[in-house]
Amino acid sequence: MVINPVKRLAESRDYQRRAHLAAIHSAVEQKILMGRGEWVCDEGDIPEEYTTISSEDYDLYKCIYPEYLSDPLHDPTEGMWENKEDYNTKYEIKRNPETERISIFASEGETSLIYLGGDPEEETFYYDFPGTSLDTDKWITFGEEHGSISVDNGELTISQTASGGSGSNLIGIATKEKFPVGSVYRARVKNISGRHATVIAFGSSINGAYPNYPHGFNVPSVAWYSRADALSSTFSWYDENGNSTTSSGNTGDLTSYQTIELHRVSEDTIELYRNDILEDTISGHLWANDYELYFSLDGHTTPDTIVVDWVEIIP
């Protein structure tokens, strides 16, 4: 195995950038929460177009540092910090005036676009589970008689409580919209109990439900499913030509939040990432159609439960 040190350093810096965006985004959300849903800051409203977070452009740190952000974060190569009156993060922020969604962009990303809350160059599907119920214009549910599907405090919880064995009594959610080859499906998710819970998947339904492990259902789909009770996982797929198999050599402990991605690189290549690290690759199998993202759990070991923080799909 040959390791490219330049690429490895670039990937490390991009991982740091993603962590910075998450911390800044969280600080903004905390301040809004403390303001009872309102953004209150002497700097004024967050701009409606991407604007650099700096002392000269939009002085966000006047609003969140150090009360909500313990360190004055900035881009690891291009950003700078002298003091609150002289800094430039090289990160950009904007607010969607219609949805009030806050998006942050790291313009200096070296290996990929780095953003949180909305891709600056693409029309994305982004959902962070606001309120206390799912938006039925965006999501369908299935199998609610087998457990519960709830939204609270920005998190989705799906729990299967009806036992019945592997592949039985499926419960979960799926996007109403289908997405094409080239799409990236992303989610921040954890499997906190039970087993056979998908932590990310795309594909088709069968009799209105979506397969938690595709190789057992003979329906085109790709899924990574977890066993919280055994700290193991399996990557499973069934393609449009009727071929299926599994891979079990990937990260087993998915009981804490992970950012997980499925990249539909081409019609016959799928890449699985966890926290920006390549976990597995499928090649030589066919998924040419548009597919929805979904989460699905069965009755093998109950309660079988996942918690999802947000979902993003980049077409």
Image (cartoon, rainbow, N blue to C red):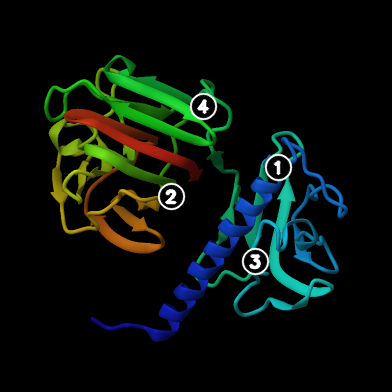
For marks 2 and 1, give the CA distance.
Answer: 40 Å
Residue ID at (30%, 50%): 254
From the image, which quarter does the N terminus lie in? bottom left
Mark positioned earlier in the residue sequence (4 or 3) = 3
Q: Which residue is mark 3?
A: 107
For marks 1 and 4, give the CA distance.
Answer: 29 Å
Mark 3 residue element = loop
At label 2, counting other C-alpha atoms closer than 10 Å, the crowd grade (few under 14, some 14-19, many 20 or more) is some
Looking at the picture, which amino acid does disc 1 mark? Met
Mark positioned earlier in the residue sequence (2 or 3) = 3
Residue 83 placement (x, y as % from top left): 78, 76
At label 1, counting other C-alpha atoms closer than 10 Å, the crowd grade (few under 14, some 14-19, many 20 or more) is few
Quarter of the rendering containing residue 86: bottom right
Q: Which residue is mark 2?
A: 182
For marks 3 and 1, give the CA distance.
Answer: 29 Å
Mark positioned earlier in the residue sequence (2 or 1) = 1
